[in-house]
Image (spheres, rainbow, N blue to C red):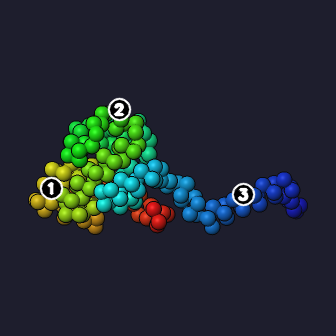
Amino acid sequence: MKKRRIRPKKRFFLIVIIAFLSVLFLKSDWLATWMYPIHYKDDIRASASNYGMEPHLVAAIIRAESNYETGKESKKGALGLMQLMPETAHWVVEQAGFATVNDDILRHRADVSIEVGTWYLNSLHRQFNHNPVAAVAAYNAGPGNVRKWLDSGRWDGRMESVKEIPFGETRHYVQRVFYYYNKYKDLYPNF
């Protein structure tokens, strides 16, 4: 039986592939930050600071809503990075006393979408007694629905019971947002 030898070219490529995979394995933080980037960090930090919200949570909502793509419009008509419904955005602008924001600005300007969306998230956070899980659910399903679930006892507002959220879309949304939130906290502890 004849022994097969690996040719020098193949050996070189095999070594390069093994080295590359080793680097990926050993430097998994690099790979993870590549897979879970945070764009618009300064805008997120500024808005989160202005409204007392955790920047990781704001970033997680942006990731779940638009994956950091400006110009997005959902099938239901939600606009911008933070995918706010135009009526909600106009209500926020009026309540917060912001300068007039039209739908085109909300859709295309990341800083405006982040500012308006973070103000709204803070409003929900306060409305639900600083419960971030209930606030995130309300960001998706609307505060009226979440209030009904909490008041009727259908859901207790905790992450441990998120499977009790009556709307499947909202249940998955909350899980996705907190998955990204935890990823971001691990990868960007000083954000």
Label 1 crowd bin: few (<14), some (14–19), many (20+), radius 10 Å:
some
Q: Residue at x 24, y 63 (%)?
A: 131
Find the distance from the CA under tag 2 to the CA under tag 3: 47 Å
- Residue 135 is situated, as x and y percent measured from the top left of the image, at 25, 57
* In the image, farthest residue toward the right: 2
Find the distance from the CA under tag 3 to the CA under tag 1: 54 Å
Q: Is residue 117 above or below residue 28?
A: above
What amino acid type is highlighted by mark number 3?
A: Ile
Q: Earlier in the sequence, mark 2 or mark 3?
A: 3
Query: In this figure, which residue is indicated by the disc labeled 3?
Result: 17
Disc number at residue 104? 2
- Residue 146 is situated, as x and y percent measured from the top left of the image, at 18, 54
Q: Earlier in the sequence, mark 3 or mark 1?
A: 3
Q: Is residue 188 above or below residue 137?
A: below
Label 2 crowd bin: few (<14), some (14–19), many (20+), radius 10 Å:
few
Query: In this figure, which residue is indicated by the disc labeled 1?
Result: 147
What amino acid type is highlighted by mark number 2?
A: Asp
